[in-house]
Image (cartoon, rainbow, N blue to C red):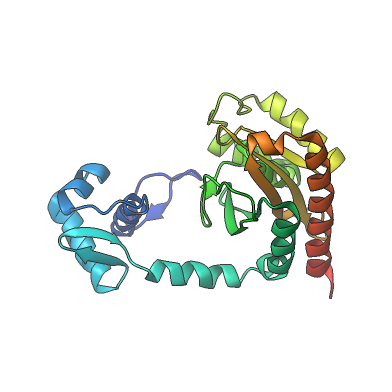
Amino acid sequence: MTNGRAGNDGPTRVAKTTMTSFEIVEALSEGERMGVSELARTVGLAKGTVHKHLTTLHRLNYVVNEDGAYRLGLRFLGLGVGVRNTLPVHGHARRHLDALAEATGEVASLVIPEHGYGVYVRMVTGERDGGPPYHEGERVYLHATAGGKALLAYLPDEERERILETRGLPPLTDNTITSRAELRTELQSIRDRRIAYDREEHVEGWRCVAAPITDAENRAVGAVSVSGPAERMMDRTTDADISGLLGSTASAIQNKLLSP
């Protein structure tokens, strides 16, 4: 182990070779197949170094070489599904997400907090047209999504402030909240109503409504959300219906988690 780059939580002793491998993995996670030269330019490393890491990852079945172009292997899918299945909140939420997507016709999702982000661990698409501009497993900023704001509102003050300090409030669209004071006001409103909104703050043309799932100490362990194209989600009658459905869905999942 050697002194590596300081992470967001301060300087630590890290394995540089592991960091390099994961830089390559993350570059390939964008979905494009890349050759060694392109990958080397992308991650800013020598071609020989990148080739050595790719060879190791290929031998372990984590990348696939297709005529000199590399992509991630499906072994990552197995790992991700296995991790998801260990989450108690996911096990209790599956049936309820199916019912929520069917009732609303929109995309029903489960978001959990991890490392200061929100992660979409499950998504169920309803019968209406228009798939979401994100995918299962995607990591998003908490301040710009309904599910993320629902999580932030029900985290301890110290943890919430640490996340905001570390991750910041980057503007993802013209509607993204970038003021700490404005965000605090909105989070208080979320605590009052137990409903959060994303008004095209994450992706233009896409809106979302979410409700928190909390534990016995009223701390967020997840959030359920319903999202869809802005023109459909702006209908106030539908929005009220969706808010009620979200509240009952989150309560049902929460009751399962809290039951002995």
- Of 121 and 153, nearer the camera is 121
The foreground one among 242 and 16 is 242
Residue 250 location in percent, x, y? 79, 57
Identify the residue shown where x is 79% and y is 59%: 215
Find residue 110 and report its image quarter. Answer: bottom right
Q: Which quadrant of the figure has residue 17?
A: bottom left
Taking the spot 78% from the left edge, 51% from the top edge, the residue there is 246
Looking at the image, how many numbered discs can be counted on the residues? 0
**Quadrant of res 157:** top right
Q: Residue at x 83, y 58 (%)?
A: 251
**Does residue 114 sit above or below 133 in this rendering?**
below
Horizontal side of residue 72 vs 207, given as left or right: left
Looking at the picture, how far across and down is residue 169, in whole percent?
Answer: 57, 31
x, y (%) of residue 159?
67, 45
Query: Seen from this angle, which residue lies furthest left?
Result: 48
Q: Quadrant of the C terminus?
A: bottom right
Whole-percent x, y for residue 252 in the image: 82, 63
* For residue 16, above or below residue 163: below
For the residue pair 179 and 85, the one nearer the viewer reads as 85
Q: From the viewer's perspective, is 31 left or right of 233?
A: left
Residue 80 appears left or right of 159: left
Q: For the N terminus, which image quadrant? A: bottom left
